Image (cartoon, rainbow, N blue to C red):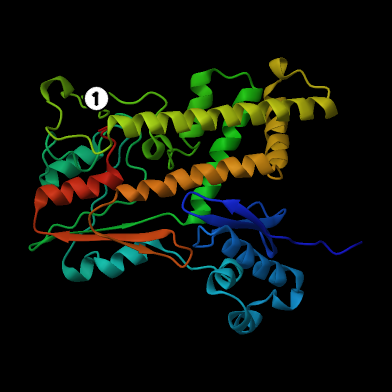
Amino acid sequence: MAEKKYRATLNKGRSGWCVIFRHPVCKAPDGRQSLRVRRGLGTRDEDEANRLVGQLNEILADSTYWNPAAKPKADANFEPQIVSAFYDHLTPEKRDGWTERSSVIPVPTKEDGFATVQFVGTTGAGKTTVGRQLIGTDPREERFPSISAAKTTVCDLEVIVSDGDYQGVVSFLPRDQVRQYIMECATAAVAAHLEFATPSEITRRFMEHGEQRFRLSYILGRLTPARADEDEEELEDEDELEPIGEDAEVSAEDQERFAERLQQFFATIESIAFRSKEEIASHFDMDFSRASKQDRDVLQEMVEEQLSQDDEFHALVDEVLDEVEARFEFVTTGELQRGRDGWPRLWTFTTDDRRNFIKSINRFSSNYAP
């Protein structure tokens, strides 16, 4: 059997040229095929980008480079961004959000004289509301931490009460994990088309991950822009509360632009679903409209297998990931620390202004529409 050839190709990204290639050593999360890598080249010049892609193709064509011990040789022969694009995946960064946050703001322990209390209750029972009362945040003016009758608290959140300035730290999911979540959301939306689901169900599957710990709707906006006076929080005494008296951080024009971009994503999903349906139907005698639960499970597996090798599908996931990364441009306070792949790793902020602190931290934790 002939040895598989690996080639890198040039791709236009949101902020410049990118390179795309299948890694000859590292496997994709499913473990069944080579890892697909897309990495920014740090240039908008096409000739320069092609030169860099040529360097990566030299690495891909020479298997003596395909191990961590060869990195010094690669450092001597190729540009840093090319070396990083290939070798970062051979020696992945170890990420632990809890440890990273604790390195900035240590969480008090029993040895420091603190006790641990656990609140237990169903979704929407009021656990976070009790937390609000304990730390003394105003439900109308500050809205921190965010609450809702729906599942809202989906990540670790530590609040430490102490004297001095207000200090905050946020850790982010790694790029590869975010991309995997996006792939799963897009796959679910394509499968929903094949199951003849309603438009609202197709939208839900794409905008809200099945585990509900990742929601594109909170990051990318909505198909219908929110009203300026809309409040997504579902409080028991909502009628007695006036909306926050401050301007929305996302303009009406931005919301319209985000909605248009989402429409483009859903049009691509529909196109991919239609093509997938035709290809699967040509190989299997299946009536999609009458598929049983067992048939739908088989269909889901076939769709996932097919999409994992579909260039148009991966291009869609890349575009969605670019939109997610673009939202960091709205972070105007504090400091973003990035990993070696350029993806935000930590955000830190210190201030003596309580209002500015709550507003800044709510960018990452709030479900308040404006």
User: Can the viewer see residue 123 in this picture?
Assistant: no
Q: Quadrant of the C terminus?
A: top left
Image vertical order of residue 131 relative to residue 244, above or below: below
The answer to which image quadrant residue 92 occupies is: bottom right
Q: Where residue 205 sits: x, y (%)?
A: 51, 30
- Say which quarter of the image contains residue 296: top right
In percent of width and height, residue 210 lies at 50, 36
Q: Residues within 10 Å of mark 1 (few under 14, many from 20)?
A: few
| Image vertical order of residue 223 relative to residue 74, above or below | above
Q: Of all residues shown, which one is farthest toward the top?
A: 290
* 223 and 161: which is toward the camera: 223
What residue type is disc 1 on? Answer: Glu
Where 296 falls versus 183 (above or below)? above
**x then y, percent, for residue 172:** 39, 55
x%, y% of residue 82?
Answer: 58, 69
Camera-side residue: 135 or 41?
A: 41
Q: Residue at x 62, y 30 (%)?
A: 190
Image quadrant containing the N terminus: bottom right
Q: Is residue 101 or residue 316 the one in the foreground?
A: 316
Q: Is residue 253 left or right of residue 94?
A: left
Q: Which residue is mark 1?
A: 230
Q: Is residue 173 left or right of residue 367?
A: right
Residue with the most extreme right position: 1
Element type at mark 1:
loop
Q: Number of callouts in the render?
A: 1
Residue in the picture at 54% in, 37% down: 185
Q: Is residue 57 left or right of residue 121?
A: right
Q: Residue at x 90, y 62 (%)?
A: 2
